[in-house]
Image: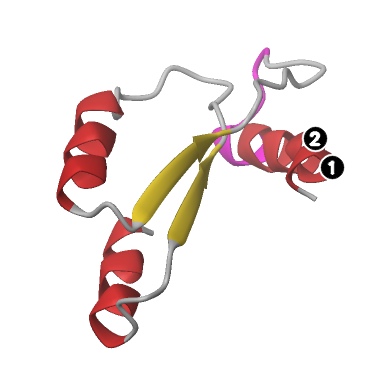
């Protein structure tokens, strides 16, 4: 998404890009340093952390299913 945002800004520098970040229901790598670097170097790209949602059950649920559940539960907050 960041690279797409940068590409859009090369063609339309007046745009402001907002990237929504939903917390993953699983242990993911830390992105804080990357987000800080991008925010400092490309001020037109802004990151918005969405509230944390917890799926009903995460035990033995495939990663793809968990991701879709989080996106489903977070949708009303994005709207």
Number of residues whose C-alpha sits closer than 10 Å to that of mark 2, classed few (under 14), some (14–19) or many (20 or more):
some
Q: Residue at x 72, y 17 (%)?
A: 54
Residue at image mark 2:
73
Q: Residue at x 29, y 87 (%)?
A: 11
- In this orientation, which residue lies closer to the viewer: 39 or 53? 39
The picture places residue 45, in percent across and down from the top left corner, at 35, 54
Q: Is residue 4 above or below residue 52?
A: below
Marks 2 and 1, how far apart at CA: 7 Å
Q: Residue at x 43, y 17 (%)?
A: 27
The picture places residue 3, in percent across and down from the top left corner, at 27, 64
Q: Is residue 19 above or below residue 36?
A: below
**Residue 25 — which label?**
none
Q: Is residue 56 left or right of residue 15?
A: right
Evaluate if marks 2 and 1 touch, with contact meaning CB atoms under 8 Å apart.
yes
Residue at image mark 1:
76
Q: Residue at x 78, y 45 (%)?
A: 75
Q: Is residue 35 above or below residue 16?
A: above
Q: Element under label 1?
A: helix
Question: Which quarter of the figure is the N terminus placed in?
Answer: bottom left
Residue range highlighted in magenta: 59-65
- In this orientation, which residue lies closer to the viewer: 22 or 14? 14
- Which quadrant of the view contains residue 51? top right
Q: Is residue 53 above or below residue 45?
A: above
Q: Is residue 56 left or right of residue 16?
A: right
């Amino acid at each position: 998404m960041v690279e797409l945002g940068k590409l859009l800004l090369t063609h339309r520098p007046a745009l402001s890009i907002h990237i929504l970040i939903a917390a993953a229901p699983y242990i993911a790598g830390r992105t804080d340093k990357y987000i800080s670097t991008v925010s400092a170097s490309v001020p037109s790209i802004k990151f918005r952390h969405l509230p944390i949602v917890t799926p009903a059950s995460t035990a033995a649920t495939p990663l793809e299913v968990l991701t879709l559940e989080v996106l489903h539960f977070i949708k009303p907050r994005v709207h």
